[in-house]
Image (tube, rainbow, N blue to C red):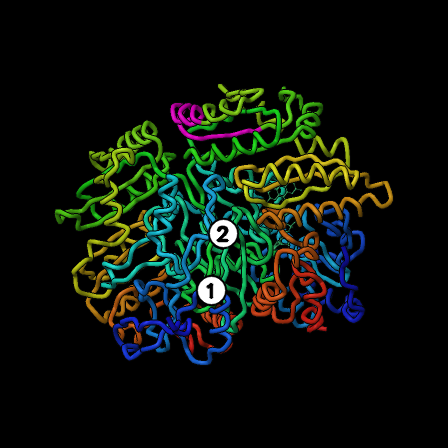
């Protein structure tokens, strides 16, 4: 059989402005990727599984990383895994689960919120620094990421960090690459620090709290020594009433003990219920389902409107939310992360006015994403640094140009 | 280790530089007499010394801005300094540089328990950050052994770690925001009380940049509630391999100890003589500490002891009280001091994959014979961060050079097995010329391009981190 040129593959379906896109660049090796980038002179849309279309719309040929996949190295005894960027997230999680380990940061699946299908890749998780409820305890994706390989906009193959947990050799470009949405380089290989799996989980639930009281309750729990690994609040739980959820994880006896202590600690906020789940019971427990609901912002599913993600000091959150007139909100990270659903086209930042933190427009029409900055506008000197970094990493302006703002 | 020759043109304008600095700082904050500048001639890498041209001690961010603007205009290199405890020569001056010390910037600006943060000026010492919140049941997690002296500024610049970072992470995982002044005097607020960056993770980039991108004057740090309790076990083994295998099994088992520390025979014997901690007579020793309530500690220690027993330990000592815990930690905590009592030593800091531990320890043993210098090993085993201590005699001509050559070989070995040159001490001047063993010229070029963005004239701590040859064309830009 006559092989097709390696980089021409079947067209993928893309919604919106880039619909006409036919050919797709699909490198299979880092060297191929480097050749493509050094030869490229026009904008590229860098894509993993295409399940997280976040950012200002980019017009350009699609470069899909989906064919660069595979686990390069996995050492359970060293708590480290090295994978190629196009590896499906599900494959990574399955490999870890087989050794009773996991990614610490509980990455969100954006598909139901964004209305996308496709296969989320680990590269996409890193490019968007995607972290879930456990972020407050275990850190963000960037905190578990210990090494990257990537190709910059000139086609140079770069590495930074490595596969060891402690490494301060040279500048930490690992952190810089996490959350840079493919605008500084195309990630080719990623190393993570992983954690042992969880034997037992308990969820301590408070009902009927207003937002401010809920944030105070979460602060009390997070300020206790009981190692809370999730703290979320919704004014509209499954039955329409407010629910505040606190999670503890670990060995069975310890989980029971800490859940009990939390229940006592939170007595001033009401009589808390405790739900427990055991990994040994196999199936997904009720508590896992609840945290997946928080992680993926399932409460917004099927509801119209734009979705914003606001990062703030937890105790500032309720007052800011009150200004939003939102259709729905969800507080995660003890209040430090607010998801807001607002009518399409709303300039949420105008409503928030000046506040300490930042707001990202996650889901909106292409028009809105072209009109409103998706990423929070930065102070002038910082914006200038960011633009200059972009120029150094991508002098031809070919890597997702404009996706995070700045001039195209 | 070589340092660039001082620029005579800069030395020639010393009095003009001093006069301008005097015009923006209180008199006692500008030190320019030889007797005074001597205090800043080195950090904890004392083999290298050179008094700076001037040292300044600003007390506010505004003063830092004024100093940097002057030095930028006059083309004078600036070396930021916290407490000068760097083991890598990070704060080593050149004769034509201005040392910018942040020791007077030491206030707590805000503590907020609801949001679990503390905002401090960067010259504050690490331990006094915890000191400011511990009565209220909180602590700042990164705990370098130098925590009594070292400053948050240095911790951020080096991304410092400590014994407890297996569970809590290093500085970068506990840092939420900084006030950064760039060489041209611009003040930037990066991060804050919220989590995650709005755009690029510049905070992550600044942390660990060894004072080469900007001067940090304030920091927002994450504080944590103190655990209910903590207790260690001590486990002795016949050989390093067994200890290494036991570490891997403990990690796999799902317990997450706060610390797993390792000591080899040389360190055990030396500290025993010095500190009398009652350590067993064995070839390898682990100290594993866990946290929680009494019952939780028992549960976790139970799992650990069960694993350890499978490896037929020569000694298993579970602490039952605060006194016993202190005794178990005593030897480990006095290890460096004890070795220092008997000898001059050089402390290395490479990291290796935990799985290579037995191989690397064996190779170090072999090399020790080849170079004719003894080595003790004491390190954070849970994360593979090794601290081989090479013993040498500073008074014996040529011994330091042999020791440095031996150290370089050990660090190359760390890289060869998939690890890195430095896990927590930083590159500074010490590992500068070894960077090419870990990075390609292009890897280094991109990192230098990052410095170009923050400090186009390469005036901030210019002779560090990158091999002098690699950075030469950039460092002469200003001249
Ligand atoms: C006995 C001993 C034990 C140690 N144990 C540990 C340990 O367990 N873990 C560990 O990680 N390290 C350890 N160290 C190393 C050292 O203490 C750390 O690197 C520490 O963070 C340095 O802090 P410092 O304030 O002394 O910084 P300095 O030595 O003054 O400077 C270190 C670096 O920071 C830069 N810098 C200083 N201030 C600023 C600023 N305001 N803005 C920008 N850059 C700045 C300097 O230019 C330099 O490059 C130890 C050192 C000793 C002597």
Give the label on residue A29, or none: 1
In the image, farthest residue toward the right = B397
Q: For the residue labelled by badge 1, is the local secondary structure a helix, a strand or a loop?
A: loop
Q: For the residue labelled by badge 2, is the local secondary structure a helix, a strand or a loop?
A: strand
In the rendered structure, the answer to whether residue B214 lies left or right of residue A119 reads: right
* Figure check: B4 above or below B317: below
In the image, farthest residue toward the front = A1
**Are discs 2 and 1 less than 8 Å apart at CB?**
no
Q: Position of residue B346 (x, y in %)?
A: 72, 42
Q: Label 2 marks which chain's residue?
A: A
Q: Quadrant of the N terminus of chain B?
A: bottom right
Q: Is residue A225 magenta?
A: no
Residue in view at x 68 percent, y 53 percent: B431
Q: Is residue B204 visible?
A: yes
Residue to which mark 2 is pinned: A146
Q: Quadrant of the C terminus of chain B?
A: bottom right
* Figure check: B401 above or below A360: above
**How many numbered discs?**
2
Q: Label 1 marks which chain's residue?
A: A
Residue in view at x 49 percent, y 19 percent: B320
Q: Position of residue A335 (x, y in %)?
A: 31, 50
Residue in view at x 55 percent, y 24 percent: B234
Q: Residues within 10 Å of mark 1 (few under 14, many from 20)?
A: some
Q: Distance from label 2 to label 1 (Cα)?
A: 21 Å
- What is the magenta range? B286-303
Q: Is residue B65 visible?
A: no
Marked residue nearer the N-terminal end (2 or 1): 1
Indicate which label's residue lies in the foreground, 2 or 1: 1
Q: Position of residue A24 (x, y in %)?
A: 36, 73
Q: Is residue B288 magenta?
A: yes
């Amino acid at each position: 059989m006559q092989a097709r040129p390696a980089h021409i593959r079947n067209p993928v379906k893309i919604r919106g402005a880039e619909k006409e896109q036919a050919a797709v660049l699909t490198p299979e090796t880092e060297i191929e990727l480097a050749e493509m980038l050094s030869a490229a002179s026009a904008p590229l849309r860098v894509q993993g599984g295409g399940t997280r279309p976040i950012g200002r719309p980019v017009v350009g040929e699609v470069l899909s990383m989906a064919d660069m996949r595979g686990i390069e190295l996995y050492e359970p005894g060293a708590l480290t895994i090295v994978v190629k960027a196009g590896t499906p997230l599900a494959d990574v999680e399955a490999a870890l689960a087989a050794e009773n380990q996991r990614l610490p940061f509980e990455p969100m699946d954006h598909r139901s919120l964004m209305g996308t299908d496709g296969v989320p890749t680990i590269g996409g998780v890193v490019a968007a620094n995607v972290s879930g409820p456990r972020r407050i305890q275990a850190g963000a994706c960037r905190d578990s990421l210990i090494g990257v390989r990537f190709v910059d906009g000139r086609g140079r193959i770069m590495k930074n960090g490595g596969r060891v947990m402690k490494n301060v050799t040279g500048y930490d470009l690992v952190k810089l690459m996490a959350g840079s949405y493919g605008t500084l380089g195309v990630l080719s290989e990623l190393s993570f620090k992983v954690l042992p799996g969880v034997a037992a989980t308990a969820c301590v639930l408070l009902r009927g709290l207003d937002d401010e009281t809920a944030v105070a309750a979460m602060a009390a729990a997070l300020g206790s020594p009981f190692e809370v690994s999730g703290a979320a609040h919704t004014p509209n739980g499954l039955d329409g009433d407010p629910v505040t959820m606190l999670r503890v994880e670990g060995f069975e006896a310890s989980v029971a003990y800490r859940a009990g202590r939390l229940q006592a600690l939170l007595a001033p906020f009401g009589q808390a219920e405790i739900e427990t789940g055991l990994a040994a019971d196999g199936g997904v427990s009720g508590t896992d389902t609840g945290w997946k609901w928080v992680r993926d912002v399932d409460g917004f599913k099927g509801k119209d409107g734009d979705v914003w993600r606001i990062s703030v000091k937890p105790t500032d959150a309720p007052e800011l939310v009150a200004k939003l007139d939102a259709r729905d909100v969800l507080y995660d990270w003890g209040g430090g992360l607010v998801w807001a659903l607002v009518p399409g086209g709303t300039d949420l930042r105008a409503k928030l006015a000046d506040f300490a933190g930042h707001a990202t427009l996650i889901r909106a029409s292409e028009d809105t994403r072209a009109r409103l900055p998706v990423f929070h506008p930065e102070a002038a000197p910082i914006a200038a640094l960011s633009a200059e970094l972009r120029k150094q990493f991508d002098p031809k302006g070919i890597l997702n140009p404009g996706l995070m703002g700045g001039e195209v | 280790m070589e340092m660039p020759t001082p620029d005579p043109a800069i030395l020639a304008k010393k009095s003009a530089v001093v006069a301008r600095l005097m015009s923006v700082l209180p008199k006692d904050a500008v030190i320019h007499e030889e007797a005074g500048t001597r205090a800043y001639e080195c950090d904890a890498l004392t083999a290298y010394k050179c008094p700076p041209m001037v040292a300044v001690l600003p007390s506010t961010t505004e003063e830092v801005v004024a100093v940097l603007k002057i030095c930028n205009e006059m083309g004078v290199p600036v070396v930021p300094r916290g407490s000068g405890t760097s083991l890598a020569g990070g704060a080593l001056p050149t004769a034509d540089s201005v040392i910018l010390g942040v020791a007077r910037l030491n206030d707590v600006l805000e503590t907020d328990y609801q949001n679990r943060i503390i905002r401090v000026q960067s010259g504050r010492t690490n331990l006094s950050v915890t000191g400011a919140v511990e009565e209220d049941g909180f602590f700042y997690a990164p705990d370098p052994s130098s925590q009594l002296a070292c400053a948050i500024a240095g911790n951020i610049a080096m991304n410092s770690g400590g014994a407890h970072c297996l569970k809590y992470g290093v500085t970068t995982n506990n840092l939420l925001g900084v006030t950064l002044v760039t060489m041209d005097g611009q003040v930037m607020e990066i991060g804050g009380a919220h989590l995650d960056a709005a755009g690029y993770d510049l905070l992550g980039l600044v942390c660990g940049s060894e004072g080469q991108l900007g001067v940090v004057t304030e920091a927002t740090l994450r504080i944590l509630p103190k655990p209910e309790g903590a207790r260690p076990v001590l486990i002795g083994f016949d050989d390093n391999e067994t200890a290494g295998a036991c570490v891997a099994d403990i990690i796999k088992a799902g317990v997450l100890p706060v610390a797993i520390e390792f000591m080899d025979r040389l360190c055990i014997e030396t500290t025993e003589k010095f500190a009398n901690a009652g350590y067993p007579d064995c070839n390898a020793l682990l100290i594993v500490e866990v946290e929680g309530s009494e019952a939780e500690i028992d549960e976790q220690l139970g799992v650990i002891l069960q694993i350890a027993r499978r490896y037929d330990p020569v000694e298993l000592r579970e602490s039952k009280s605060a006194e016993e815990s202190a005794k178990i930690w005593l030897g480990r905590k006095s290890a460096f001091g004890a070795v220092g009592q008997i000898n001059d030593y050089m402390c290395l800091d490479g990291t290796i994959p935990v799985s290579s531990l037995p191989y690397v320890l064996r190779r170090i043993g072999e090399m020790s014979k080849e170079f004719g210098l003894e080595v003790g090993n004491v390190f954070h085993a849970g994360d593979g961060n090794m601290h081989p201590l090479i013993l040498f005699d500073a008074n014996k001509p040529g011994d330091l050079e042999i020791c440095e050559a031996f150290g370089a070989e050990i660090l190359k070995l760390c890289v060869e097995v998939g690890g890195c040159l430095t896990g927590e001490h930083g590159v500074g001047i010490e590992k500068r010329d070894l960077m090419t063993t870990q990075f390609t010229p292009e890897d280094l070029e991109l990192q230098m391009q990052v410095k170009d963005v923050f400090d186009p004239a390469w005036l901030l701590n210019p002779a560090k981190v990158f091999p002098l040859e690699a950075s030469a064309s950039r460092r002469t830009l200003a001249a």
